[in-house]
Amino acid sequence: MTYDLHTHSELSDGRDRVRDMVRAAEAAGLTAVAITDHLEVNQFGGVDAEWVGSLLREVEAARSQSRVMVLAGVESSILDWKGRISVTPDLYSRLDLILAGIGWGTKGIGFYQPEDKTKAIRRLVDVYCLLATNPWVDVIAHPFNIGLFFKDLNLSEIPLTAVAEVASAFREGGVAFELNNSFWWWFPHRSPTEVREDYQRIVEIFADNGVSFVAGSDAHSFHGVGQLSWVRRLVQRVGLREQDFLSLSALRTRRFHRLR
Ligand SMILES: [Zn+2]
């Protein structure tokens, strides 16, 4: 893993400038870094994307000053359990990478939650299967980050069949599975080690289904760029190999076909 495909700059809720995030990537010995600031929906249901122009300019400037490959991306929240996101085809074509993940703004998961575990599992499967068919998504950010939303549902309680259903949807839709170094943060009632042990089973099923992985730190300051130690342990336990990860050339090829 020589890249970090999930970081935030001051253009959303990160602390540092794009330039410093890229310098930190070089210092960490990475070959590539993606700046993926949050693409949010405003109170009127519109998308605030004016800052994307600044992102593209700052990424361009950073590229000219560093050997690190820099991708301009966004992290889009999933709007509802039907897997809708706030990315338009135009936005997709202007950027290099689109991450999409469940958050507090995801209707039916972050709020208006299902009343029991069975329904919660069904909803989770539905949201990911529908999202995987959205052509304007490259990577699903921190899949199964449910700890804060479904508090009494443990990752280990999700049936293998449900996980396998999502895995084959990812495979068919050609979306990548992000191994997010901050994944454990979403489970405040479990230790990071327990979360890794619970998650391992899920990651193995995706690997068995031939889904590609990417790695991201979710750094919100330059200090965290390239910080992937929790992910590395997970990768080791699962036994993922270099070829299980999405290469940047494969990403480019796939995006090219989607935009045709
Ligand atoms: Zn993030």
Image: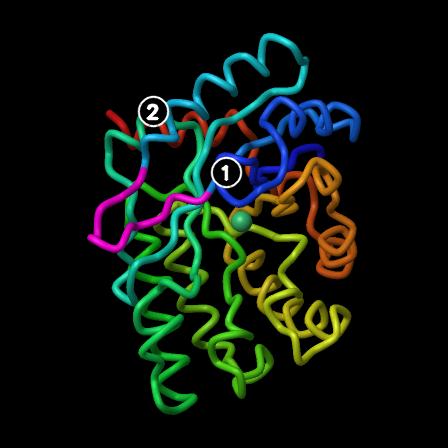
In this view, the residue in front, 1 or 76, is 76
Residues in magenta? Answer: 38-48
Residue at the outermost top position: 64
How far apart in space, not on screen, are marks 1 and 2 (Cα)? 13 Å
Whether residue 153 is situated above or below residue 79 in the rendered picture: below
Q: How is the image coloured?
A: rainbow
Left or right position of 236 against 100:
right
Residue for point 56% across, 40% down: 8
Q: Quadrant of residue 84?
A: bottom left
- Three-letter amino acid code at disc 1? Thr
Total numbered badges shown on the rendered structure: 2
Q: Is residue 46 magenta?
A: yes
Q: Quadrant of residue 156?
A: bottom right
Q: Is mark 1 within 8 Å of ligand 1?
A: yes
- Picture coordinates of residue 165, whole percent (x, y): 40, 68
Residue for point 45% across, 61% down: 167
Residue located beneath label 1 in the image: 36
Residue located beneath label 2 in the image: 94
